[in-house]
Amino acid sequence: MKKILNSLPFKLLLGVAVGIVLGLVANEAVMNVVVTIKQVLGQIITFCVPLIVIGFIAPSITKLGHNASRMLGIALIIAYVSSVGAALMSTAAGYALIPHLSIVSQVDGLRELPEVLFQLEIPAVMNVMSALALSLMVGLAITWTKSKMMESLLDEVQNIVLAIVTKIIIPILPFFIASTFCGLAYEGTITKQFPVFIKVIIIVMIGHYIWMALLYGVAGAYSGKNPIEVVKHYGPAYITAVGTMSSAATLAVALRCAKKSTVLRKDMVNFGIPLFANIHLCGSVLTEVFFCMTISKILYGKLPGIGTMILFCMLLGIFAIGAPGVPGGTVMASLGLITGVLMFDDAGTALMLAIFALQDSFGTACNVTGDGALTLMLTGYAEKHGIQENQNIESPIL
C-alpha cells in the first residue's frame, strides 16, 4: 500500500482530484494564488525541457554509435519504423475518430481565470529544436572522433539531468497538474469533458492490441516462424510492465519470457531485448499521439494540421530512443515537441502529463510485448543473411 501511495501515478491522480475539487469551490482570491503557482511551476518545467533533450538524446547516440554494427543498425531501423508506424496509425485514427467523440471546444458560461499575482519569467537556455540539433550533432561527432572523455562527460551530464528530472521535475508535477486542473474546473471546462477521456483511453488500448497483432504478423511472415511461439510466453512480462510502468524494470522478466520461446535465437534475445527495452516505445508513442490530438481538440478547438502531425511523429520516434526509462519517460523526453511543434501551452502540457500517466501502464506493456516481435525479426534477418549464432553477444545497452 505504501508503495502505491508513493508512486507517481497515484500522486498525479491525487493532484487531478484535489485540483478539480478545489476548482469547484474556490473563490477568486484563492484562484489568484493557484494561477500564480501554476505560472511559476510551468516556467521551471519549460526551462528544463531543452536540458532533458540534450541530456538524454546525445548520450544515447554515443552509446549506440560506438557499438555500431550491422545488427545494431537493423535493430535501430526496425525500432524507429515501429514507433513511427504506431504514431502514424494513431494519427490516422485520431483524424477518423476524434471529430465523432462529441468534444465541445467552446463551452458556454465559462468563468475567466483571474490574473497572476506576479509574473516570473525563466527563459530557457535555448529553444527545443536547437537542443535537438545540438544533441544530434554532438552525439554523432563524438562517435566519429571516438572521444572517450566527451563520451564520459555526456554520461555525467545524463546523470545530472536525470537527477533534475527525479529531484525537481517529478516532485513538482503533481502540484503543477493540480493547479492546472483547478483552473480548468474553475472555468468549467474539465467537468464537461470527462466522458471523452474515458472513451479515449479505451480507443488507445484497442490501438495497442491492433499494433501488437500487426507487429507479430509481420515478424512471423518475414522470419517464416510462428509468432504465437513468442507471444504466448509474454504474459508475465505484460503483467509486470502494467504494474511497474517501466520497460527497464520489466527487463529481467522480459528476458526470461523471450528465452522460453523455441523460435527466437538466444543470441538475438540477449542482444535485442535489452536494446529494444530502451529504444522501442511503440505503445507509449501511440498513446501520446492520440492524447495530444484529443487535447488539442478540447483546449484549442481544432486538430493539428496533417503536416504538423507527420513532423511530430517523425521526431517523436527519435525522441523515444533517448527517453529515460522511468514511468512517463516518453512524454517527459518529448515535452519539447509538444510545446515546440504542437504549440501546447501550460494547460495543454499539464493535461497531457496527467492523462498519459493514467494510461502509461498499458503503453509500457505494449512496448515490452512488441520487443518480442522485433527480436523475431532480428532472428529472421540473422538466419536469412547467414549470420552465425554467437552465444556471447550482448546488447550495447548493457
Image: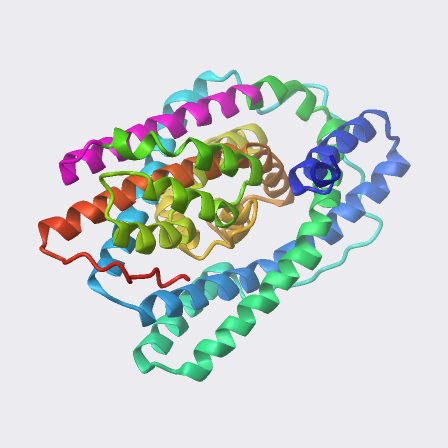
Q: Main secondary structure of the magenta part?
A: helix
Q: Is residue 44 visible?
A: no
Which residues fall within the magenta stretch? 198-226
- 227 horizontally vs 232: left or right: left
Q: Residue at x 20, y 47 (%)?
A: 379
Q: Residue at x 33, y 82 (%)?
A: 145
Residue 143 point in image, percent of width and height: 34, 75
| Residue 319 on the magenta segment | no
Q: Residue at x 71, y 31 (%)?
A: 184
Nearest the eye: 235 or 168: 235
User: Residue 82 occupies which quadrant of the picture?
Assistant: top left
User: Residue 300 occupies which quadrant of the picture?
Assistant: top right
Nearest the eye: 177 or 100: 177
| Residue 209 on the magenta segment | yes
Q: Establish if 346 lies above or below 301.
A: below
Q: Is residue 81 visible?
A: yes
Location of the N terminus (image quadrant)? top right
Residue 358 point in image, percent of width and height: 59, 33
Location of the C terminus (image quadrant)? bottom left
Residue 206 point in image, percent of width and height: 41, 23
